[in-house]
Structure formats: structure tokens, C-alpha cells
Amino acid sequence: MNADSSLQATLEEHFRWFHMHPELSMEESGTSLKIREILSGVGVETLELGLETGVLARVRGTEQGGEEVTVALRADIDALPIKEESGLPYASLNDGKMHACGHDFHMTSLLGAAMLLQKKQGSLPGTVKLVFQPAEEGVCGAQKVIDTGLLDDVREIYGLHVAADLNPGEVEVCAGADHAAVDRFAVHVTGRGGHAAEPHHAADPVVALAQFINAAQGIVSRNVDPFDRAVLSITQIHSGTTWNVIPNGAFAEGTIRTLCQNTRERMLKRLREIGKGVSLSSGADVQIDIENLSPATDNDPELAAIVADTARELGMPVVPVVPNMGGEDFSMYQQRMPGVFFSVGVGSPRPLHNSAFIANPAPLAAASSLMAALAEKALRRIPRSKPKPPV
Ligand SMILES: [Zn+2]
Ligand SMILES: [Zn+2]
């Protein structure tokens, strides 16, 4: 067995374990323990992250003079509240929980990268931090990791996500945004209830909410550049208790996804304006609460080109990108430091977040090699300031 196939066999074994033991956001204690065990088994140092879950590891090479340079590789580790229906022999043992977003693949490939970097420790010209981030699906884990301050010294960061619709081992990478900004909004309508037969004595929150929803659906078609991409979805509405009573209030919730910051701000402004307009026209009070979750990903153009070149060098085909309107809190790191988030194909018969999603583990070793190579290239490329002469 050559080195690559032996790494692949080791990683597949770990991948199956992670797939069988999915844990939800901020509950990843068994997963974190397993990651620590695997890392300590191959001599990789782990640092105290100070969060309930998640792991931060470090491979320290030898500095080549001048300041110490650190780069980071990131994988997310949480699963989803989905009952698995993949039919896999290594399906989830945790009922109602499933690695349906491929985070089992992400953390396994990062473990592979750690193993490869550890072997090269003697010739590595700097330090690589390996971030096993909790709670990506809850869209708060990246911020928690950043708030520890343990990535303050990181100069570049790389992360990957599996792509269900690409063939195993194909790589998709672009400059700029390929995952959308995520905003969540809630609409609280306060009207004045009354008899269904006497609407003129009431301020009907149901009609007001209906007007709001119809008007909000016009934002993408009337206020967004047709060459830009944006989505507005209203995903729940609640009001009333029976057929002959006009209720006092109504509630709706939804999300806006955008790739461009200007479009994001414009859509949120229009949402508030529509709320005010409907308040005036309906006589019911419409309040909009907006929660800005994560910005769009923002890949550094030069580094994205390096990812594509490195993938090709490793024999991984690079295919054109179709931007994804899903969110990804990797973007929080990219607010702090240059980085690239790219996709690796796993050829699933079903999409991400589907109960029959299956990540083909065949490209695990290749994904590990790509991550390790990106870290090593970054350490060789990032300029050092000259050491200060003695005084
Ligand atoms: Zn997901
Ligand atoms: Zn994911």
C-alpha cells in the first residue's frame, strides 16, 4: 500500500466513525474528543480553545528568520437535526441527527492535512493552526472562535465545503463571493381585533401581513439589478385562532440572501420601508426586526487563483463556479484576514441537507493534500519583516 492509499484508508475509517456519531451545534463533545484522540495519536499539539466544544490544533515548523508567520485551515464539525435515510452501512447511530452537510468529510480531511503537515514539521517554514469549528449550522461558531483571540496572529485562512453535485474530487473556486450573506427578519403586526362581521371597527393584522408579504416579494424583481443575485423567502406566518374573530396580531419570519453588500443594504432598507408603508395604509402597526447573521464569503482573488493552481497540480479538476445562495460563517474569518473558501465534489445522489445525502469519501486524501499544500505554500509566500538589528 503506498502512502496515499494508506492515508486514504485511515481517513475513511475516521470518516465512517464521524458519520455514525453526528452531534448538533454546540453539542459536539464526542466529536471533539475523537478529534483530540486522533491528533494526539499522530503527535499533533492541541491548544485550549476555551469553548464547550471544538478543537484548535497547531503544527509548529521552524521559522526561517524574521517574524513568526501563522496561517490557518478550518473545518466545521456539527451535524443537522435530520433523520438519516441514506441506507449506508455506516449510517447515523444518533437518531434524528445526521451529517447531511458533509462536515464529517470536512473534519476528516483537516485531520489528514494535520497528519501530512506534522510529517513535514522539520521543513515547514512557520506555524499552521487547524480550526475544528463548532456550530456552523447555528451560524455562530466562527464568531465564537474569533472571540477567543487565538486566531489574532493568523495571516491567511483556507476552508472547504463538499459539493453534492460535483464529481468526486472536482474543485470549484472563485474570486469574491460564492456563498451568500444571511439575514433573518421577523415581522410583528399589531392590529386591533374584533368581530369578523365588523372589520370596519378593527385594524386587521391578517390583511396587513398579506400586503406586507406581497409587497416584499417585489423587492427582488423591482429593486435588485437583474444581473445580481438575491433571494427573499418568507418561511412562516402565524395569526388568529378561529374563523369569526379578527385577531389582534400576526407574525411572519423569513430570510434575505445576497452576494453583494450594496444589494444587501438596499433590500433591508426596502423591507423596513414596506413595513412603514403598510403601517400607514392598514392602520396596524408593522415592526420589522432584522438579525444580520453572516456576510457573504469574500475570496481573495490572488489566493483563489493559487487554490485553483494547487488543485490542478494535485490532479484535481477545477470546474466553473455556480454561486450558492446558502450562507457560510467562514465569511466571518474573511472579515479579519484574507482567505479562500472552496468546494470539493463528493458526487452525492441527493443535495446537501437531504436525508439521503451521501458524501463519497474517495477524495478525502486528495482534499487533505490540497489543504496541507495551501498552508505550506502560504507559509513560503507570506513576506517576513526583517529582524531588528541589535542595538
Ligand atoms: Zn449546512
Ligand atoms: Zn455545511
Image (cartoon, grey):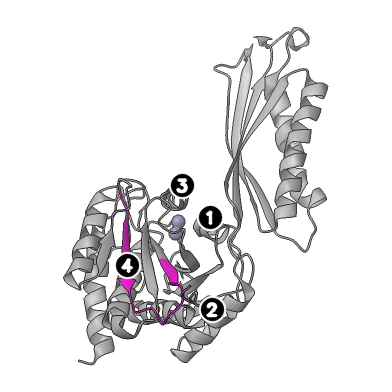
Other residues around mark 2 within 10 Å, as few (<14) / some (14–19) / many (≥20): few
**Residue sitting at x 71%, y 42%:** 268
Q: Secondary structure at mark 4?
A: strand
In the image, which residues are magenta?
Answer: 53-73
Tell me if label 4 and label 3 are in contact, CB under 8 Å.
no
Horizontal and vertical percent position of residue 351 = 46, 63
Mark 3 or 2, nearer chain start: 3
Percent coordinates x, y for residue 383 in the rendering? 54, 78
Q: Which residue is disc 1 drawn over?
A: 332
Amino acid marked by disc 3: Cys
Q: CA distance from mark 4 to mark 2?
A: 21 Å
Sequence-first tag of 4 and 1: 4
Residue 203 at x, y = what percent?
A: 73, 14
User: In the image, what residue occupies the spot 62% across and 19% down?
Assistant: 249
User: Taking 327 as reference, is 37 left or right?
Assistant: left
169 within the magenta span: no
Closest to the camera, between mark 4 and mark 3, is 4
Residue 76 rendering spot, x and y as whole percentages: 39, 59
Give above or below for 378 relative to 336.
below
Q: CA distance from mark 1 to mark 3?
A: 9 Å
Horizontal placement of 314 versus 238: left or right? left
Q: Is residue 58 magenta?
A: yes
Cα–Cα span, label 4 and label 1 = 21 Å
Q: Which residue is mark 3?
A: 140
* Foreground label between 4 and 2: 2
In the drawing, does residue 59 fall left or right of residue 229?
A: left
The label number, if any, that marks residue 58 in the structure image: 4
| Mark toward the viewer: 2 or 1 | 2
